[in-house]
Image: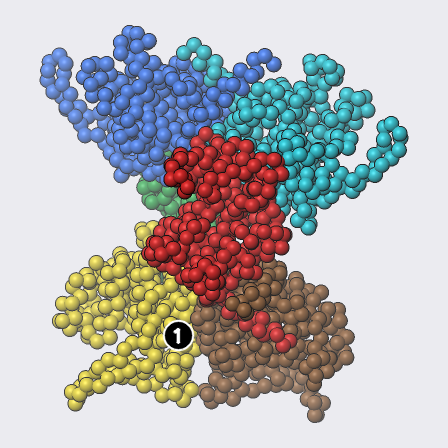
Chain colours: A yellow, B green, C blue, D cyan, E red, F brown
Amino acid sequence: MDNKPTKANLLIEALPYIKEFHHKKIMIKYGGHAMIDEEAMNSTARDTVLLKYVGIEPIVVHGGGPEITRSMNKMGKEPRFIKGLRVTDEETMEIVTMVLVGKISTDIVSKIGFHGGKASGISGKDSQLIVASKKAPHKIKDDETGEEHVVDLGLVGQIDSLNTELLQMFTENDYIPVISPIGIDDNGNTLNLNADTVAGEIAAEIDSEKLIILTDVPGVLKDPKDPKSLIKQIKIDEVDDLIRDGIISSGMIPKIETCVKAIEEGVESAHIIDGRIEHSLLLEIFTTKGIGTMITK
Amino acid sequence: MDNKPTKANLLIEALPYIKEFHHKKIMIKYGGHAMIDEEAMNSTARDTVLLKYVGIEPIVVHGGGPEITRSMNKMGKEPRFIKGLRVTDEETMEIVTMVLVGKISTDIVSKIGFHGGKASGISGKDSQLIVASKKAPHKIKDDETGEEHVVDLGLVGQIDSLNTELLQMFTENDYIPVISPIGIDDNGNTLNLNADTVAGEIAAEIDSEKLIILTDVPGVLKDPKDPKSLIKQIKIDEVDDLIRDGIISSGMIPKIETCVKAIEEGVESAHIIDGRIEHSLLLEIFTTKGIGTMITK
Amino acid sequence: MDNKPTKANLLIEALPYIKEFHHKKIMIKYGGHAMIDEEAMNSTARDTVLLKYVGIEPIVVHGGGPEITRSMNKMGKEPRFIKGLRVTDEETMEIVTMVLVGKISTDIVSKIGFHGGKASGISGKDSQLIVASKKAPHKIKDDETGEEHVVDLGLVGQIDSLNTELLQMFTENDYIPVISPIGIDDNGNTLNLNADTVAGEIAAEIDSEKLIILTDVPGVLKDPKDPKSLIKQIKIDEVDDLIRDGIISSGMIPKIETCVKAIEEGVESAHIIDGRIEHSLLLEIFTTKGIGTMITK
Amino acid sequence: MDNKPTKANLLIEALPYIKEFHHKKIMIKYGGHAMIDEEAMNSTARDTVLLKYVGIEPIVVHGGGPEITRSMNKMGKEPRFIKGLRVTDEETMEIVTMVLVGKISTDIVSKIGFHGGKASGISGKDSQLIVASKKAPHKIKDDETGEEHVVDLGLVGQIDSLNTELLQMFTENDYIPVISPIGIDDNGNTLNLNADTVAGEIAAEIDSEKLIILTDVPGVLKDPKDPKSLIKQIKIDEVDDLIRDGIISSGMIPKIETCVKAIEEGVESAHIIDGRIEHSLLLEIFTTKGIGTMITK
Amino acid sequence: MDNKPTKANLLIEALPYIKEFHHKKIMIKYGGHAMIDEEAMNSTARDTVLLKYVGIEPIVVHGGGPEITRSMNKMGKEPRFIKGLRVTDEETMEIVTMVLVGKISTDIVSKIGFHGGKASGISGKDSQLIVASKKAPHKIKDDETGEEHVVDLGLVGQIDSLNTELLQMFTENDYIPVISPIGIDDNGNTLNLNADTVAGEIAAEIDSEKLIILTDVPGVLKDPKDPKSLIKQIKIDEVDDLIRDGIISSGMIPKIETCVKAIEEGVESAHIIDGRIEHSLLLEIFTTKGIGTMITK
Amino acid sequence: MDNKPTKANLLIEALPYIKEFHHKKIMIKYGGHAMIDEEAMNSTARDTVLLKYVGIEPIVVHGGGPEITRSMNKMGKEPRFIKGLRVTDEETMEIVTMVLVGKISTDIVSKIGFHGGKASGISGKDSQLIVASKKAPHKIKDDETGEEHVVDLGLVGQIDSLNTELLQMFTENDYIPVISPIGIDDNGNTLNLNADTVAGEIAAEIDSEKLIILTDVPGVLKDPKDPKSLIKQIKIDEVDDLIRDGIISSGMIPKIETCVKAIEEGVESAHIIDGRIEHSLLLEIFTTKGIGTMITK
């Protein structure tokens, strides 16, 4: 009986957060380590189910880069990138859709179901959830020659509008929607979308309380080599300075910009957290200090 | 960051119980130590609020013996007991009602409110929640002389019927009802009722999953002097033997009989737990072993 | 058969008023003679139930001064007043709460139930119905010496905010709420409130059609010694003159001010009526002339 | 102020009946004197509206014999009767429909509306409320010659089935439906129906509490010449004897049979009352003795 | 099997219109040829039912001039017209009501029912659907003498207000309301109304998508003698010119003005179509070209 | 204007079927030619949307054999069949899932959306829609050697239970669910299911009116070489004889057995139709003769 009171104490400590986020929506972007293997996905799914059971409404958007590349390789299709962006021809788009909707999403749904949640996979094509249009080709400067090239990434889209009626139906009926980041254009074509962007824009549209992005870094670090230099909280009007100073750089920039946009459109706070830490989701939500970087107004 | 994963682990350990009792009603009889002082009442109230927030529907029935006696003394009215049962004349009944409804219930309601729950006090008189009738006088044998006396305890009642429509309204609208154990007879008279009995009968009527009685003992003990001799689980058809063998005795007998009746009428399990242990309520509900005695079918 | 058509005629005469107030809320402040004894309370309760059955929604706030004083005396606690206002220390507050919530309210609820209504007692502590704060001490001039004293009446409060969600739930489900005039402050302390004020402020908050205050006088009289000098109707902008001219004086002033405030906040009319007349409630509502003083915009 | 308490007393006396029939349906057959002129119809309509406002759900079926004959005469069409039953050819049926639906029903609807009720006229043709079929021709013996004739009354129908969905919609939305007693057969033809029968069968189908038939006699009289010989109550198993003894005779027989059938199918009580007495409807419902003959199980 | 694919093709061709008007209200004014005989009324009713079944919400207003005149003749009452307007004395008003409500409306309701729709007849008197007032007498110049006469047409009304709650109840419950164009004034008197006007004003009030008026002409013709000179579409700001040029003239003027008013108050389009063409209703709604004249903003 | 009345006539001819199946569910198994190319899928999707718009509730289950084989070939994975059944190892199961859920289902959803329907893809894994278990290995006789082999087809499942709550939510909210025929076992593993069986069992579970299976044959033929020998209707108790006589043979046997089972469990009729005929779906539903073989009780 010795350790039990301690256990109950911890439940009691979580109470203020459970109250604060009661019946609130929390958008969670699954990515990186949190989806790396069976065990990691199970853990992430179980944490998500716990949120649901304590009265929070989680909505999931998942990414899938590494799995897509693996599948393309299997199919003898060579992935092609320009400056880090995937060139998406029709055949690639078909593979992307199959992997995101037919593999990753069904896996997440199974795992949430296994832990007692009711999940349902939806893609941006379901009842026109995400209407998108092809991104215009843009100029890229060759670092070496200094020449400018016009680059067309193919079927890569930007979000035009969201029809979240379907999402509302899910959350009102206690389902956890699991969203694959593809869009549909006016002619019925499928377009590849950035998962962080999808998570951010849907979060804003459905009045989500939080946007939580699971990554493979501790958050924003003052010194990228020192994980102890984590910046716990950033206000959105500090972001420009941090970028100029090089503290927010490269791959973190679009993530932070997604967060800033979501907050400007009404999300209360956005969180960049480390999916490599077990239960990082719960620790970020149910502890005062949290474990990653929180962006707020 | 060291102890945090542990904290989250404990939340995850509670998940199976949170799932099992989701949207289920749990009737809690407040009594003894759990109501002894400000701090104890605050702790009990906070635990009750936590149950609500993780999706369980607590209903509270409270007792109040010691407080009644204190108030009677203040008013210069001497409490009179026959074989442990309070003799209740009209003036006593008025004091009992004032203390239960006007003092104890309003206190509990305040404390639940303070911790973030929505509570509302109701007595058995509100919209005829508890219709009762006066208990017939009964014979008691004088232990010394062996003579039999007919004893009339006065305004002490037994439950005839329950109108739980009001309770349903509260639970459906996310209120925690706090019930004072008095009844009303067909002529509008108030009757004194046993709080355990009220808890048990209402638990059965509203299809409660559990009946939890907070007491000042660890539960049913094989050896009353050895708190380590706790019997963790009793099946209702073992009860007769346990009474005959003297293991269940004196004040515990009516409590156990209340539990047995509740189970026979549909409550899944009844629990006698030790209110002196902090968070005993949470430990009983959210741990495999529990901390008291569980009675089941 | 002779007198029967007459009887039906009277029902027909009430029809215009029944129609006018159909599904409208009427706030009734019980006080004075209307609560003086069993018979008076029964009559008031029966009239209230009739209102409910003909489609009006009565809400009751009750007072309780005399009963509180009686109970304090019983408990050997001497009531103390400064200029007519009860000084409320903690012990007094406890007694006040017990008497209002545990005695008077449960009595009214019983009687309404006995006459076929569904009533439920609530205090200002139930789900934070009435959030109040302690009144600041104020200066009082000694009539004899002319000296000013700072007087602290103790736990006497003023209303800060109302959470009427609970009230709405009651009226939507055909319950008659019976409200005890105590409040709760941010720290969970109980505060003593003026019952007329509570009735008036709640009436305004819940869009009550009428506020009816049962008193022991015929209404506002031009000549206080002549009950025939009743002023049937006062417009709120005539009130200042009537006070200056001494026609509205002493104890009537705060009542009228409560009425004026309620009307300014949206109540259609306020009524000061004589609870000593049988069925005064029905006569005021269902007859053209009424029997007391009506205050309107 | 002298007579006012009396007035309120009378309201209070009606309370038990108002409670008893709260939210209950009462089917009222308008006929005879109650529809004889503007004043009578106004009075009947006002009484009906009062029932609605005190929480009772009145449903009206009206007759119309005299008005039909008047209209036929105006149109130069001679009414023809065989043994008191109207022979209904197609032209007559058209006139009957126009008078019932287009004149009498719209008149009643106007008057109910004028007194503050929401009424809507419906005929048996509206969404197939009353599906009927033509009555088979039947033999009639000539009283003088003793010969038997086969008589075909034409478009006179009997009720086959009722589709009361429309009625439910009206009563649930606080409308008073006013039903014209015509039916529709499977081929879309209109059929003439007996209004008492329509009232009785619909009363049973919609679980009406009472069936009240307004007539021009005091009720069933032991001695038809002595209005004081009124039989206040008849049990349905006494009816056969009363017919055999000639106490129930001629035109009263089908009315009583309609009442008996309605009661056998679930209506609590049926009432034959005198529409010539003012407010007879209210007197029958709101007084202990009533004023006519009540038939019960 | 040969012609079947063609059949299905036609269903598919109607799909865009079925989608466009899904759950939209369409007000249909029945008049002229569409009501001329059994066959025509059956065809019109069947088309109306089809609209309902493919998800459109038809509301019907009917006229009835010729039938009224026929009935008046039968009753030996001579119809009197001044400049084409029916002089309506009380007796005429009674006949008008009987014919509209008791004959035409019940006929339409039967036929809609026969084809599988749920219809219910309502007049402007039902729950005060159409509150009207008597038109003021107006001056008319004698074409021959040039003298001006003050003409009082009697019980001819203009619409003051509409209470469409009843209509909403019908359409929400899948009924097709069939409205007779009479009104009721504040004193309960019935007034004769122009059916086109009733259709137009109700169409605007209930946010109807279309107003379709069935007439006996092809629509607005450039050359009244050449049916091929049909003007397919008129914008409301072209109407004044068309009237000035004499293209819209005589009886068409009030119809067009009704259409213009309806469109100004929110109806999307109004249609004057030829009821003599079979299925003109369906052809106007489900084909691109339509068959009559469409008026739009 | 010549051909237009014809067009409207055809709409009117469909009316009886539109009425008969109003608000009824129709389960459609997409397969074979109906999914063979863009044009065929577009046509099938448009027909499905039409059903929805005329008030029928279509539910879609799709197959996908040829596409799966194509994708496996692309990925260099050789499909293996034993007696026509696909051997499904883990890698194959992953490809099957990706193709069914990630390619075929999203394609159908897009096309239904393009034609104006609201579709959402769901697999048997979404909220445990289809709980299945691995089929036991079964013996197969080698046609040549006569030897028996025990064959384990791998991850091929049979349906254990259905959780159609999710489906109900979709149909109640006007969505067309598109179901991929995979199941989930108790351990979260994915299993390959026969699409016809899935369609049949879900049809029965959700009280579908019809089960329509789109194939590449005209239906059941008496003489397989003569398409004119189509059997229009089969009663379920004739099926055994037809199988024994060899008229129902090979691939048609499991389809017919699925139909028989569905009908035995409550589906009104099952239809084997030829997806190669344009609009075969509409012709089967909206014409008297239909175009394929109908199986009924």
**Could you tell me which quadrant the N terminus of chain C lies in?**
top right
- Vertical arrangement, residue C226 with respect to residue B249, above or below: above
Q: What x and y, as percent, mark residue F79?
A: 53, 86
Q: Which residue is at 62% across, 55% downward?
A: E39
Q: What x and y, as percent, mark residue C52?
A: 46, 28
- Vertical arrangement, residue F226 with respect to residue E149, above or below: below
Q: Is residue F245 left or right of residue C290?
A: right
Q: Quadrant of residue A279?
A: bottom left
Q: What x and y, as percent, mark residue E18?
A: 49, 63
Res D214 seen here: yes
Under circle 1, the secondary element is loop
Residue nearest the observer in this picture, F45 or C280: F45
- Which residue is at the far front? E145
Residue nearest the observer in this picture, C27 or D134: D134
Q: Callout 1: few (<14), some (14-19), or many (20+) C-alpha neighbours within 10 Å?
A: few
Q: Quadrant of residue F194?
A: bottom right
**Could you tell me which quadrant the C terminus of chain C lies in?**
top left
Res F168 seen here: no
- Vertical arrangement, residue E282 with respect to residue D112, above or below: below
